[in-house]
Structures are given as C-alpha cells and as structure tokens.
Image (spheres, rainbow, N blue to C red):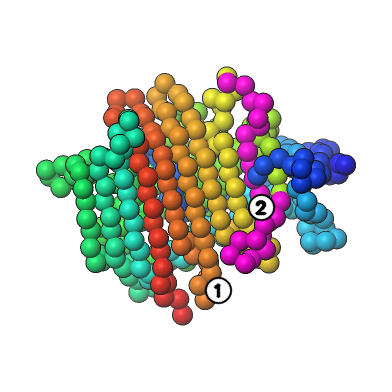
Amino acid sequence: MALFLRTESGLCIITILSQHESVGFFYICFMNKFFLLIASHLYFFSFSQDTLMPIVFLDDVIISEENNGFDVEDFIYYVKNDTTFYMGFKHLRYYSHKFESSLNIFNKKNKKIASINKYGDYHTDNNKAWVSYDSTHSNGRMFKRSGKHRFYTPEAFDEVFFPKDTIDVSLDISKAKNKGDSQNMRDAKTVGFSIGSDATEQKKGGLNKKLAVFSIDMQKYYDYTISDTIYNNIECYVFTIKMKDLVDEKDMKKVLIRNLVSYFDKTNFNVLYREYKFIYNHFLISLDIDVVVHMDYVNKKHVPTKIYYNGFWNVFLFKPERADFLLLNSDYIIN
C-alpha cells in the first residue's frame, strides 16, 4: 500500500511495509587535518522549496495527522530542524557531573599501542566550567617528551570534552558563529548535530556535498524508514537513514554517511539515542568511523550518559590513526 503526499515541490510516495518487508533503519565527528569527530553544537538546516521530500518507508507505525497531530512531511521537518540533540550537549557543558573515560590507540594490525583513562568531575557555576581529575593513567607512547599528545585523536577529544582552561557556558541557542571556535570545531558543529546539512566550510574531497542526506542529489542513495521502539522504558519513534543495498561501488564514493539512526521521544521529540556510520575513501582522506550516543533524563533535563567512538582515519601526509573512545557521564547536578 502507498500513501501519496503533495508537497510544494510536487507529489511524493510514502510506502507502507509490513514488519517482514521493512527496510532496516558528541559527540562525535570532528574535522581537523581532514579528520571527522563529533562535537557539541549545531547549525540549523531548514527546508528549501527545491528540496523534494524523500520516499519514506513506514515499518508497522502509522504517521498521520489524525493519529499523531502531524504527518510524515511534518516528521521529516522535525528531524531536519531538531535542536534537542544539540541542547542535550549544551546540558552536558552546563551542568556539573562526574565522568570516566577510556581511549585506546591501535596499530594497523589492530594491536593496542597506547591508552589513557581519566576519572574526574566537570564543574560549573552556570557561567563558567572547568575540569578536575581524580586520576589519570596512561600506557604506551601516548605523549611526546614535551608532554604534548603524540596522536591527534586524544587531542581532539580533550578539546571537545576536557577543556584545559575555564570556559564560558550557556544554554542559549544561537546561529551566530563563535569567533573563538576553530574551523575544525565549526565543521564539527555542523556535522554532528544537523542531520542533512551541507554547510561545512571545509570542502576538501567534496565532504560538504556528501553530508546533505536529504538533498535531491543524495536521495537516490538512501532509504528512509520510520519505525518505533522502547528505549529506557520510553516510547520512541525510530528514524533511520541507510545507504541503499544496491548502490554500486562507484557511487559508494559519494555516500559518506552510510547509516544514521535516531530515537525520538514520542511525547516531546527529544533525541534520546543516535548512532552514525561514516565511510569515506578519497585519495586525500580515508575513514571508517562509528559513533553511538546514549541520552537519558535527569530532573526532566535530557543529557548524554554514554558516548562511544570507534574509528580509523588516514590522511595524506599524516600517519593513520585507529582508536576507540568511551565516555560515561553520571551524577549530574540539576536543580
């Protein structure tokens, strides 16, 4: 069975599948020296009138204005204009909490060659934030003799999650650029928290084009699915963007985001879970990155509780790096 929706751009088809026929459905993509790692901000991405609405598969869930107060077109609009994931990471920076993290570096044979573990507290006074450590422990050649990081990956995560100095914090959402941000951080803000944006300022290898998963040019490479699930005893919509199974090897080079899954709380559309799969091969850049972010509610504020990264990147003229990173956040102080 198929639903036909009329948009400002024309007629589109919404196909409803049974469970057996269904198509399967930061923190932390950050760009420096062509390296992607998710960080904690957002640029807004709004509908343009020349953007066709993609075909969306409905897996055993009915989205209609009668049942939900919104239709499929509205749902896609919410996805593309979501700020809740961004706000969750604003909460991470704004509220005091405890953290523990582990980061491992591997060689090309996937043997661990360096690691660092950190335990401590993230402090805020509603205007400023700073980090204190209960303990840090490293193994292998994680640091140079100068004390600087030998590898880029831990340096990037330190910039995002463990600032060396006191930083300003706020819950304000603004489209304006932060003049203090590096170009790398600005790209991270776009990539990590605005699904479908092509607004990255660094355009090496055409990465900006490959992030626009809703653009007319990219829709032919993706399946879009709406389903539902129970996450932490909360009913959620599941929205999946997945590369089509029949994309040929040549076209795969055009598809940076291979899989993107988001869980939306049905009561308020807060993003409670998100996972990314990035694969990209270019003569300048090669990467294979997985990111998973778990969110939860603390005193009605939703915050990141678990962030996991596993990735490989190889950039021309730089040594390749393979690493995994786990960050656990707990004991938020939210009054």
Per the picture, the main secondary structure of the magenta-coloured stretch is strand
Residue at coordinates 77% horizontally, 53% vertically from top-left?
Answer: 61
Query: Which amino acid does the dot numbered 2 rest on?
Result: Val
Q: Nearer the viewer, residue 184 or 96?
A: 96
- Secondary structure state at the residue bearing disc 1: loop
Give whichever of discs 2 and 1 has the lower sequence position: 2
Seen in the image, is 200 located left or right of residue 66? left
Residue at coordinates 22% horizontally, 40% vertically from top-left?
Answer: 150
- Residue segment shown in magenta: 227-249
Seen in the image, is 89 located left or right of residue 246? left
Q: Position of residue 83 (x, y in %)?
A: 57, 57
Crowding near pointer 2: few (<14 within 10 Å), some, many (20+)? many
- Give the label, 2 or 1, closer to the camera: 2
State how far apart marks 2 and 1 are (Cα). 21 Å
Query: Which amino acid does the dot numbered 1 rest on?
Result: Lys
247 part of magenta stretch: yes
Residue 235 appears in the figure:
yes
Residue at coordinates 41% horizontally, 39% vertically from top-left?
Answer: 311
Q: Nearer the viewer, residue 123 or 18?
A: 18
Residue at coordinates 32% horizontally, 43% vertically from top-left?
Answer: 153
Which residue is label 1 attached to?
A: 300
256 part of magenta stretch: no
Q: Which mark is residue 238?
A: 2
